[in-house]
């Protein structure tokens, strides 16, 4: 199996997981972190700790960064960016699509190949099949560094637009956090009647799982932007949600998550689409 010698900048929870799994898979790692003292578990496995970013960039031809956000990447790399020439830069830090494209353009301007990675997993999952990491940018880098990428988790390649991995990642996260918010709103409503979160979850989780099954059943109307065959009309839905809001207030629980949804619904009703399907709220987001 091909092994890679690479440098890892950033030893937070995720960086340490990436370094550890790479070392366990036989790769050689030079590590650096802004705050010293985070490398012990890695040097114990044979990692070399670089004293500076410059030493880290000089030590390998493949540079992986797992920092905090877009600005932290520039804070770390800008002063030494000329050392990136002829190297591979793999960014595993969460950024927006535009920020990923900017990093790709900056890396390319310094003569480096750029691959953007969006980790759809927690540090504990890294190294296992279910750790999905989405990549976008240089296909050549995916191919040449495949052994390293495979050590981290399952690899998908979204295309040469460096922003695509981040777009997929953040679009999936918005669905997840909206679901979490609704779940927690339900927990709060039942807790106001002294029902435990566990009791609520035992009913809500299978219910929500069944409802999410419906999401993929028919999507053509979303691509055709035709909402004229309502399953539930916007007028019907807003009335039901007004009842949910009243119930929430009666229990002294803020209906804020539903109020946000009502804003999207009312915009369509006010535009004359009350008899169209609930899915038309997507038009309030464009
Ligand atoms: N942890 C998770 O579950 C998620 C899963 C999905 C992907 N994320 C992204 O991974 C990036 C790193 O996340 P993390 O959990 O490792 O984050 P921290 O433990 O907070 O470590 C942050 C590292 O970044 C360094 N850092 C922060 N700001 C700067 C800066 N201005 N200059 C240099 N380094 C910086 C920090 O260094 P230090 O504080 O130890 O000195 C850590 O090494 C992230 O994009 C997640 O969205 C993880």
Image: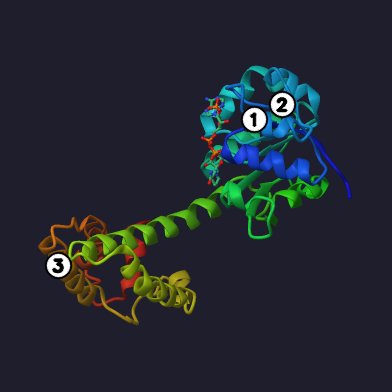
Q: Residue at x 52, y 29 (%)?
A: 71
The secondary structure type at the circle numbered 2 is: loop
Q: Which of these two is toward me, 259 or 100? A: 259
Q: Residue furthest left?
A: 250
The secondary structure type at the circle numbered 1 is: helix
Q: Nearer the viewer, mark 2 or mark 3?
A: 3
Q: Is mark 1 within 8 Å of ligand 1?
A: no
Q: Which residue is mark 2?
A: 110
Mark 3 burial class by Cα count in 10 Å: few <14, some 14-19, many 20+: some
Evaluate if marks 1 and 2 touch, with contact meaning CB atoms under 8 Å apart: yes
Which image quarter holds the C terminus?
Answer: bottom left
Q: Quadrant of residue 278?
A: bottom left
- Residue 154's place in the image compared with 11, above or below, is below
Q: Residue 133's x, y, as percent?
A: 64, 52
Q: Which residue is mark 3?
A: 247
Q: Residue at x 54, y 52 (%)?
A: 169
Residue 170 horizontal side relative to residue 77, left or right: left
Q: CA distance from mark 2 to mark 3?
A: 59 Å
Q: Which residue is mark 1?
A: 106
Q: Quadrant of residue 24?
A: top right
Q: CA distance from mark 3 to mark 1?
A: 53 Å
Q: Quadrant of ligand 1?
A: top right
Does residue 266 show up?
Answer: no
Q: How many marks?
A: 3
Q: Residue 117's x, y, as percent?
A: 64, 46
């Amino acid at each position: 199996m091909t092994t890679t010698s690479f440098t890892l900048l950033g030893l937070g929870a995720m960086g340490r997981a990436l370094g550890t799994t790479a070392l366990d898979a036989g790769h050689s790692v030079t590590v650096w972190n802004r705050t010293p003292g985070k490398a012990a578990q890695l040097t114990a496995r044979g990692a070399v700790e670089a004293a500076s970013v410059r030493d880290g960039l000089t030590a390998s031809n493949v540079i992986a960064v797992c920092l905090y956000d877009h600005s932290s990447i520039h804070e770390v790399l800008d002063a030494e960016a000329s050392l990136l020439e002829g190297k591979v830069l793999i960014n595993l830090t969460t950024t927006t699509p535009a920020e990923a494209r900017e990093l790709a353009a900056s890396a390319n301007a310094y003569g480096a190949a750029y691959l953007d990675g969006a980790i759809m997993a927690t540090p504990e999952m890294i190294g296992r099949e279910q750790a999905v990491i989405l990549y976008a940018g240089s296909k050549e880098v995916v191919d040449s560094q495949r052994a390293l990428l495979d050590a981290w988790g399952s690899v998908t390649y979204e295309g040469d637009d460096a922003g695509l991995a981040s777009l997929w990642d953040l679009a999936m996260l918005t669905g997840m956090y909206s679901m979490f918010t609704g779940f927690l709103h339900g927990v709060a409503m039942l807790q106001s009647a002294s029902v435990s979160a566990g009791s609520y979850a035992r009913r809500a989780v299978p219910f929500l799982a069944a409802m999410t099954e419906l999401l993929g059943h028919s999507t053509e109307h979303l691509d055709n932007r035709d909402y004229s065959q309502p399953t539930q009309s916007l007028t019907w839905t807003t009335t039901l949600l007004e009842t949910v809001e009243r119930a929430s207030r009666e229990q002294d629980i803020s209906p804020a998550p539903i109020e946000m949804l009502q804003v999207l619904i009312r915009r369509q009703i006010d535009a004359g689409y009350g008899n169209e399907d609930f899915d038309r709220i997507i038009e309030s987001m464009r």
